[in-house]
Amino acid sequence: MNKGEEMKPIELMHWHESFSVGVRIVDEQHKQLFNLINELIVAVDSNQQDEMLERTLHAVLAYTEIHFRTEEEIFQIHPQYTAHCTIHKQFTEEVNSLLANFAEHKMDTAAKCLGILT
């Protein structure tokens, strides 16, 4: 995003029962992750102060990491387990590369992370 360019608001994520995978802890974590992502969307859309934005982004990423570990422990026997773990790894690598520039480009980094998350 260029200086002076305004970001388009990102639509909030709403849980729907069709997203359910049928494992209570995973479904509850997905709902919590949606809530945290929505907080990040609001933080980005309202141009929150840097420290608030940083705190919200790190909360989302920390919870995402916990969620990935939970899924990986539970779904080890699933036929798509390896592919799912690869997606987790790619997400983590992509976000970590973005965070290297967070100090200089907080809003851009948070917005890019939101794009990946959603």
Image (tube, helix red, strand yellow):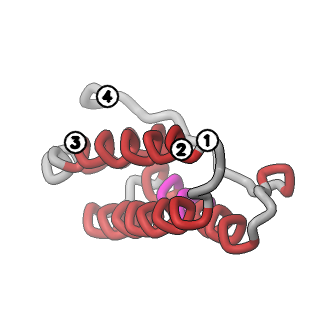
Marks 3, 4: nearer the viewer: 3
Pick whichever, 91 or 42, lies toward us: 91
Marks 1, 2: nearer the viewer: 1
Q: Please report contact status of discs 1 and 2: CB closer than 8 Å, yes or no.
A: yes
Residue at the spot 34% in from the left edge and 48% down from the top edge: 92
> Within 10 Å of the Cα at label 4, are there few (<14), some (14-19), or many (20+) other Cα atoms?
few
Residue labelled with disc 3 = 97
**Of helix, strand and loop, which one carries label 2?**
helix
**Of helix, strand and loop, which one carries label 1?**
loop
Q: Which mark is residue 80?
A: 1
Q: Which mark is residue 58?
A: none
Residue 91 in sight here: yes
Q: Please report contact status of discs 1 and 4: CB closer than 8 Å, yes or no.
A: no
Residue labelled with disc 4 = 1
Cα distance, mark 3 to mark 4?
17 Å
Q: Is residue 37 magenta?
A: yes
Residue labelled with disc 2 = 84
Marks 1, 4: nearer the viewer: 1
> Within 10 Å of the Cα at label 3, are there few (<14), some (14-19), or many (20+) other Cα atoms?
few
Cα distance, mark 2 to mark 3?
20 Å
Residue 108 in sight here: no
Cα distance, mark 1 to mark 4?
36 Å
Q: Please report contact status of discs 4 and 2: CB closer than 8 Å, yes or no.
A: no
Pick whichever, 34 or 55, lies toward us: 34
